[in-house]
């Protein structure tokens, strides 16, 4: 049975009628929908076990702590981390990158370099600009090849003795480009730079194994992988996390506090000040369980097929431009496209009239839009519940937009 046939009934929102049409949700890269098990796990948690974590000795306090830490164990296995201490909960990808930019930023000096790429989401650009500005450091970017892949020769040229951080996306949220993380991390290590990987579009889509990727830090958001908003993961190699001085202080991240100084807690709690997103951790645990039952290899294969079908079908419509690598190159679960004569917002609004939800705009990747030579694009993106029928509905609807021009 196809993955969407196995899963669709588990997602109550997919029963919605939108503008008189059954919902065709093709915006999972912005945020995925949630299966009933995630919704129920969170509501059960609030109905039965809620209390703050890591502080109260009473029964509910212990139950909540156990659930929160069980979520960490689940994520640790899901991403192939060497130990649970390497898994830090954040508020999401943006929060994880900011945490790293703040902490690593403090170690930078004037003239040091931060290397990013031209396909980054703003959340993997702006925090580094802020860190650089504060320390007199410089941000550089790896250019793209004509096909929308990272220019690997340029990586070698740009990774120099002053490069302290190399931050790049595993999967582009616009082009769908998959970057060769292990190779890039290896080159960065030889240059003495720390690697930060933005896995926001990879974690929902690809099997992950931190030991194979060889980067220092990897961040992602739960809400794009069937889990709730408000929680994300920062994985760090133990030695990399140990070398990182916490930049955010507060309760629970310390062992002992005096008026003029404090001693940090152990990993991973030293990077989790304050009350964490507890119900969200429970929801993330349910999302990971759901994905593991499906199998990430199957998830990747399903979404790869949908992306290929979309590239082929949209690419065959006259006046439609598909951005990113050709259909023969493996890509993530997103397909950005333009329709000649129509603003991307009009494309999205006209599709919405037929119940088809796609995102339009610059996708928080303005440097990449400049590279594409457009102000924005429309974008279809997929998850485990997306179907080939939905891809056909999209293609027919886009073709009919053209015929109305
Ligand atoms: N990095 C990438 C590659 C992303 O795609 C996104 C969100 C983020 C970082 C930020 O994640 P957040 O959970 O902290 O917001 N991308 C999108 C998108 O493509 N459409 O809406 C949000």
Image: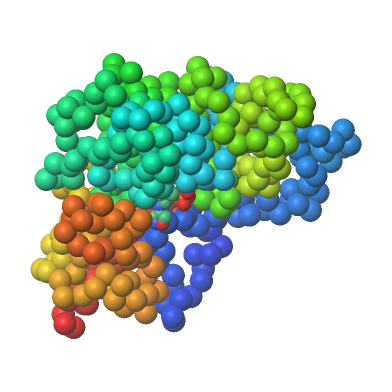
Q: Quarter of the image for the C terminus: give it.
A: bottom left
Q: Residue at x 67, y 42 (%)?
A: 276
In the picture as drawn, the residue positioned furthest to the right comes out as: 58
Front residue of this view, candidates 243 and 400: 243
Q: Residue at x 26, y 63 (%)?
A: 376
Give the number of marks. Answer: 0
Image position of 293 (left or right of 259): left
Image position of 331 (left or right of 382): left
Q: In the image, is residue 126 above or below residue 314?
A: above
Q: Residue at x 34, y 23 (%)?
A: 193
Residue 105 sits in which quadrant? top left
Front residue of this view, candidates 247 and 216: 247
Q: In the image, is residue 168 above or below residue 394?
A: above
Across and down, in percent, residue 224 comes to 47, 50
Can you see residue 79? no
Image position of 329 (left or right of 301): left
Residue 277 sits in which quadrant? top right
């Amino acid at each position: 049975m196809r993955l969407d046939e196995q899963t669709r009934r588990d997602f109550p929102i997919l029963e919605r009628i939108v503008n008189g049409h059954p919902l065709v949700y093709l915006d999972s890269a912005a945020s995925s929908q949630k299966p009933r098990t995630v919704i129920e796990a969170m509501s059960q948690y609030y109905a039965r076990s809620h209390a703050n974590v890591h502080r109260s000795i009473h029964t509910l306090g212990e139950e909540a702590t156990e659930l929160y830490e069980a979520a960490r164990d689940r994520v640790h296995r899901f991403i192939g981390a060497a130990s649970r201490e390497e898994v830090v909960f954040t508020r999401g990808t943006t929060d994880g990158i900011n945490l790293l930019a703040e902490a690593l930023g403090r170690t930078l000096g004037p003239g040091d370099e931060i290397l990013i790429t031209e396909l980054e989401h703003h959340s993997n650009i702006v925090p580094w600009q802020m860190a650089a500005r504060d320390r007199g450091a410089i941000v550089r970017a790896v250019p793209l090849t004509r096909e929308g892949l990272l220019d690997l020769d340029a990586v070698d040229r740009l990774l120099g003795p002053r490069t302290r951080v190399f931050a790049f996306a595993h999967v582009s949220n616009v082009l769908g480009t998959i970057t060769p993380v292990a190779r890039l991390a290896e080159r960065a290590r030889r240059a003495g730079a720390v690697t930060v990987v933005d896995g926001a579009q990879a974690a929902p889509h690809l099997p992950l194994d931190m030991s194979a990727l060889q980067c220092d830090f990897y961040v992602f958001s739960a809400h794009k992988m069937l889990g709730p908003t408000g929680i994300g993961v920062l994985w760090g190699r133990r030695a990399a996390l140990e070398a990182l001085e916490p930049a955010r202080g507060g309760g629970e991240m310390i062992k002992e506090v005096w008026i003029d100084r404090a001693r940090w807690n152990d990993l991973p709690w030293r990077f989790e000040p304050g009350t964490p997103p507890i119900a969200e951790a429970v929801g993330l645990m349910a999302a990971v369980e759901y994905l593991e039952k499906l199998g990430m290899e199957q998830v990747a294969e399903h979404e790869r097929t949908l992306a290929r079908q979309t590239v082929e079908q949209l690419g065959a419509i006259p006046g439609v431009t598909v951005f990113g690598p050709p259909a023969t190159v493996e890509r993530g679960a997103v397909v950005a496209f333009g329709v000649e004569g129509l603003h991307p917002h009009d494309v999205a609004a006209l599709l919405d009239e037929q119940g088809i939800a796609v995102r339009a705009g610059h996708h928080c990747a303005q440097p990449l839009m400049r590279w594409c030579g457009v102000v924005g694009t429309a974008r279809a993106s997929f998850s485990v519940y997306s179907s080939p029928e939905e891809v056909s509905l999209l293609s027919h609807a886009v073709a009919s937009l053209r015929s109305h021009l």
